[in-house]
Amino acid sequence: MIFKSINPFSREIIAEHEVLTNAQLNQKLKLSESAFKNWRNTSFQERADKMKKLASILRAKKDELGLLITNEMGKILPEGISEVEKSAGNCDFYAENAERMLKDEKYDTPFTSMSVYDPMGAVFAIMPWNYPFWQVLRYAAPAIMAGNVTLLKHAPNVIGCAKAIENAFLEAGFPEGVFQQITIDITQVESVIASDIVHGITLTGSEMAGSSVASLAGKYIKKSVMELGGSDAFIVLNDADIEKAATVATQSRMLNAGQACICAKRFIVTEKVADEFTALFAQKVNALHQGNPLQDGINMGPLARLDLAEKLSHQLEKSLQQGAKLVVGGERENCNFQPTLIDFVDANNIAFQEETFGPLATIIRAKDENDAIAIANNHRYGLASAIWTEDRENAYRLARKIEAGNVFINSLVRSDSRIPFGGTKKSGYGRELSEIGIKEFMNMKSIIIE
């Protein structure tokens, strides 16, 4: 079997990648097992030196790697370069903080007692195409700094990125087998999860993929972390700074052509300011330029695959049939989907109920702040939310009522190495980043000495 890497703007095949045979996959698993025996016994300093070197390599090659991202999945070049820089920053963060985060924890008992953190083995990662470097380095930097090794199954359309990341690890001096990308088909996933060396599974992807992989993790009694879909609420209250809210709303929905789980997708606006916000939002969306992601002056590239663009077109068409009003955009040619805004969406609309993975923004009008919170929580996803209001005290009170893993006040929702990230409900479970992220794939072992 061959995976084809297709440039989503030009539709040209830019690379082909052979899927591993089962025999080749078994060799990868054996190498992972062998590498773990040595890597787990290395010092934090040795790991940190290599991780710092990796960060330097990523920064030195950011233009080349950013171009690879653009060619494989279509985001504009500045966004691809920024993604590589952010990934390098995460490597630095864990190089500098892993040892402190994993220090022994002592307890107040009449006898000596403590918890220590041991690496588990291999972490098997199934990662998506939308942030092909960041999603990988987000989990891999802490996992490897903790003494684990990892096996990466990347999305079929960004295998070039997967191979580039593996090459960067090797160039930084990491032993073979510490980080391996494995080009495998879905039918081979179970054999990896069943392998004795694999003790943790992390997946970022769709609700359906998460359900399937989490079932296999449960079958083989393996720890898993799931970061799944999102339909993030962006709540605008009466006293919000409407101009700033509309500016950030545009950025939050249209960044990466709207292809992110934490993109704002449901813009819930109180009736008093709905017309003003919608007009400003439409103005800013209309000013965006979609097109060739390598061309100066382009704010948004194509969607990553044709099937994704077709699905979004269907969701838009159905939304309008269900009573939504088209404000801006709506046109599509192949993978090129114009930035689009629709108004008067309600809870029965497909654009409300489903995750829309592309540049489609929806306005939902709420009676007041309590109604806005109720609308935000009326969803099976609970990844992140934003609240816009000048009353910080009230914002904190409302944030506590939001059913989501992250709530940002007057700010763009984003991930940060210093802050735990993850969702609730059908958006998944477990956390990445910060101290809790590095501990997700560790064995917390209690030691008691009388």
Image (cartoon, rainbow, N blue to C red):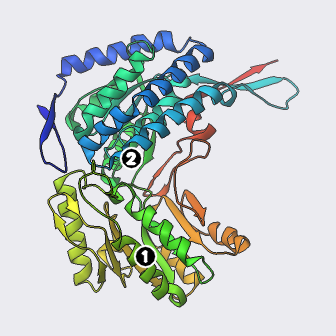
Quick one: SS at disc 1? helix
Residue occupying the far right of the picture = 110
Of badges 1 and 2, nearer the viewer stands 2
Q: CA distance from mark 1 to mark 2?
A: 23 Å
Give how far across and how far down residue 144 sits, in percent: 50, 24
Residue depicted at x 80% and y 31%: 107
Give how far across and how far down residue 160 sits, in percent: 26, 32
Q: Nearer the viewer, residue 341 or 30?
A: 341
**393 versus 177 height, above or below:** below
Q: Quadrant of the N terminus?
A: top left
Residue depicted at x 46% and y 30%: 59
Residue occupying the far front of the picture = 296
Quick one: SS at disc 2? helix
Q: Nearer the viewer, residue 126 or 110?
A: 126
Kind of residue at badge 2: Pro
Give whichever of discs 1 and 2 has the lower sequence position. 2
> Mark 1 = which residue?
281
Residue depicted at x 32% and y 27%: 164
In the picture, the disc for residue 78 is 2
**381 versus 17 height, above or below:** below
Residue depicted at x 55% and y 24%: 145
**217 versus 261 height, above or below:** above
